[in-house]
Amino acid sequence: MPWDVLCLYLAVSPRPISAVLVKEFPKAQKPVYYVSQVLKGPEIRYSLAEQLVLALIIAVRKLRPCFQSHTVQVMTDQPIKQILHRLETSERLLKWVIEMSEFDIEFKPRTAIKAQALADFITELTTPAESPEGQKTDWKVFVDGSSITERSGARIIMIGPDSEELEYSLCFEFLATNNDAEYEAVITGLGLAARLGVSSIEVCNDLQLIVGQVSREYEAKDGKMTAYLMKVRDLEKGFASFRMTKVPRKENERADALAKLASANPRNLSRTVNVQVLQQPSIQRWVEVKNIEYGESWMDPLIKYLTKNKTPEDPFEAKRMLFEVHAGTCGNHQGATSLAFKILRQGYYWPTMKRDAKELVRKCDTCQRHENLIHVPVKQQVTIFGVCPFFQWGMDILGPLPLAKGQRKFLLVTIDYFTKWEEAEPLATFTTANVHGFVWKNIICRFGIPRVMVTDNGRQFDNHSFKAFCANYHIDHRLTSVAHPQSNGQAEVTNRVILWDLKTRLERKRRFGQVSFPMCCGCTTQLHESQSGRRHSD
């Protein structure tokens, strides 16, 4: 009946589109008619909304009597009504809106699938028609380049199967010969065709050299031409059919004229022509360096502070650093000055570093418990100079200590007066033979024969055997006087520092005598490095 309301369902796929007109009944929908069509040429590049409106306009044109005598409700889940009534609607949609304005068409949201399944089914069954043999279905691309003294350019004209034309211009901001411009036009044309989804393409050019090289008739001997040819070879792999054809200059004069116009002044081109400015040749390769791993350096917080006045997020980082170096796993409770310089050598710095180090050492409980108490009166110090490294050595005994493995309880310590380098060895018994072996292995074999050896008046040093040993190697053995034992003060100070380091490191045991001697020996193996930079004035 004329007053019946009909429903229209639309379906869109990459190539075919369809529309199904149905009539509503109390418990069912019955189809009235359906239409379908395969998209061609520019229609393939329509947006989804434009393809849906195209399916609607095709249904209106083919089922005009139904639209004239009935109210038609378009059932869709897309905002077609809002798109058609926008002020900035395109010219194509505006023409379709005017064409449909004479009919009573309503747009309603699709609440259930119902007849939409039929429209989708028709779309699936509609296949693109195969082109008959001999019919041309490939795109033609006319390219031409132009090079003048001041500027170079190129022109591309693409003609599709349905005679639609696309124009594209290139302007080069680098020096290019005429052959370079021709190759740039070919490469850009192939890239545009690949983005449009073209599978079969024919490139037309009027330069015999370029056509011959691409068609493998000529050999590219120049390095630059070879690079351009390799670029074209890579692009042509993306097409099912590709061929390069030479055309007379007369057939390519349109592209030639526009290429010359683009190379002379791109502003003279029509506004409908797309213009691309190339900053560099297509064959120029940039070496990409990928940063696999990146970590903040010690300079980043300083740069942030100087540029953005941003302080570190963790205000206690400096205190933790000071405590770790001073009393941590490898800390040896150094003085304030040595602690600050040690942190600086590790790559850390902040303006109040020395003041913070002095404050930490002053408040360290372990340092206060085991700090040396000086009771001697103040007097002028007597300096003992070392002529050169390993020239004069001082030697002394430390112990007895708690027994360790192998009944070791003594520590024989020697120090160089010039470099303050220390050598130490644990011993079970302290005999003259042990002293001979220590001097031979740890001093003579490693640093050469010393000139002076300073010891106290112990029986292990002041005996005929050790004096003969020193005389055999021309070593001046000097004994400290009983009235002035400070002559070997360097070795005495070293013993005191070693004992102080052991006590501060092993404070956890509460009592030094409870710690096994192997742990003490393990600590003394690192004294060479820790004492070399220590200032006893701290």
Image (cartoon, helix red, strand yellow):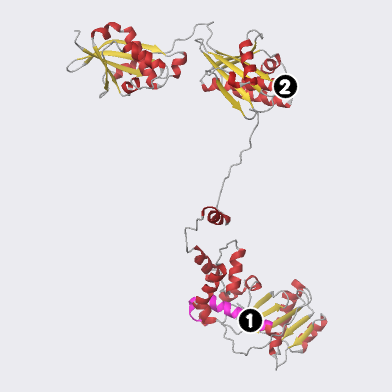
The numbered disc on residue 102 is none
User: What secondary structure predominates along the stretch shown in magenta?
Assistant: helix
The range drawn in magenta is 490-512
| Label 2 sits on residue | 220
The numbered disc on residue 495 is 1
N-terminal-most mark, 1 or 2 = 2
Residue situated in front as seen by the camera: 395 or 536: 536
Q: Characterize the local packing of mark 2: few (<14), some (14-19) or many (20 or more) Cα atoms within 10 angstroms.
A: some
Q: CA distance from mark 1 to mark 2?
A: 83 Å
Q: In the rendered view, tell whether residue 180 sits above or below residue 442.
A: above
Residue situated in front as seen by the camera: 264 or 243: 264
Where is residue 190 shown, x and y percent of the image?
58, 20
Residue 440 falls left or right of residue 264: right
Residue at 39%, 11% (x, y): give it.
37
Which part of the image, by quadrant, shows the C terminus? bottom right
Where is residue 157 shown, x and y percent of the image?
57, 15
**Total of numbered circles in the picture?**
2
Where is residue 270 shown, x and y percent of the image?
55, 17
Q: Is label 2 in a helix, a strand or a loop?
A: loop
Residue 362 falls left or right of residue 496: left
Mark 1 or 2, closer to the camera: 2
Amino acid beneath label 2: Ala
Is-magenta flag for residue 338?
Answer: no
Is-magenta flag for residue 496?
Answer: yes
Q: In the image as oriented, which residue stretches furthest toward the bottom?
A: 483
Q: Is residue 76 visible?
A: yes
Q: Is residue 35 visible?
A: no
Amino acid beneath label 1: Asn
Which part of the image, by quadrant, shows the N terminus? top left
